[in-house]
Image (tube, rainbow, N blue to C red):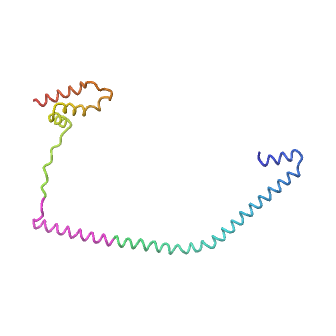
């Protein structure tokens, strides 16, 4: 039961003196809690009044240190970048002189293979290798078209195979 209900019940049954004692005890506890909170507030307030000005003054030193570190890192970066650019300039100058003299070595690239369409790839796979391998290649091409439980004959594949064989013969 809630404390208020107890107080009401005590008052209802004519025990007002007990109710007054309970109310006085409750008031004392609340005053003690308020005094504890007040002391905690005053301690924290005095600490903050002491520490905040020091923290506020240290912000400048903090920023100066960070900015010095940043600018030193940027200086190193730009120095290294300058070295790389000067090396690249020397390489490009050397390349330009070799081109002007005609001493630049040329690489011979291999001739590219013509692109093949899907029909040509299937025909090439049929024309090479033993007969069983050809059937397996065709089945591998068309297996995704059939559900996995369909393990019997593949009439469509057989028809496609004979069509491709006829094309090879002509």
Q: Residue at x 32, y 29 (%)?
A: 148
In percent of width and height, residue 64 lies at 47, 74
The relative height of residue 76 versus residue 157 in the rendered view (above or below) is: below
Q: Residue at x 19, y 35 (%)?
A: 122
Image quadrant where one finds the N terminus: top right
- In this image, 148 relative to 92: left or right? right
Q: Nearer the viewer, residue 75 or 157?
A: 157
The magenta region covers 78-106
Per the picture, the main secondary structure of the magenta-coloured stretch is: helix
- Seen at 29% across and 26% down, the residue is 151
Magenta stretch encompasses residue 44 = no
Residue 121 screen position, x and y as percent? 19, 37
Reply yes or no: does residue 93 show up in magenta: yes
User: Residue 90 is drawn in which quadrant?
Assistant: bottom left
Q: Quadrant of residue 106?
A: bottom left
Q: Quadrant of the C terminus?
A: top left
Q: Is residue 26 left or right of residue 124?
A: right
Most foreground residue, 98 or 33? 33
Please say if 4 is above or below 24.
above
Spot occupied by residue 30 in the image (x, y as percentages of width and height): 77, 58
Residue 96: quadrant of the picture:
bottom left
């Amino acid at each position: 039961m809630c404390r208020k209900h107890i107080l009401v019940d005590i008052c209802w049954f004519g025990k007002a003196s007990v109710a007054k004692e309970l109310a006085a005890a409750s008031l004392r506890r609340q005053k003690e809690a308020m005094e504890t909170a007040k002391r905690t507030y005053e301690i924290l307030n005095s600490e903050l009044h002491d520490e905040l000005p020091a923290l506020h003054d240290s912000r400048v030193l903090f920023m100066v240190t960070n900015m010095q570190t940043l600018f030193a890192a940027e200086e190193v970066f730009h120095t290294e970048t300058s070295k790389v650019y000067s090396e690249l300039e020397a390489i490009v100058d050397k390349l330009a002189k070799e081109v002007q003299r005609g001493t630049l070595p040329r690489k011979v690239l291999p001739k590219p293979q013509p692109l093949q369409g899907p029909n040509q790839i299937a025909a090439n796979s049929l024309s090479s290798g033993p007969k069983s391998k050809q059937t397996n290649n065709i089945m591998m091409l068309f297996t995704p078209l059939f559900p996995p439980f369909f393990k019997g004959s593949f009439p469509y594949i057989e028809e496609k195979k004979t069509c491709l064989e006829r094309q090879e013969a002509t």
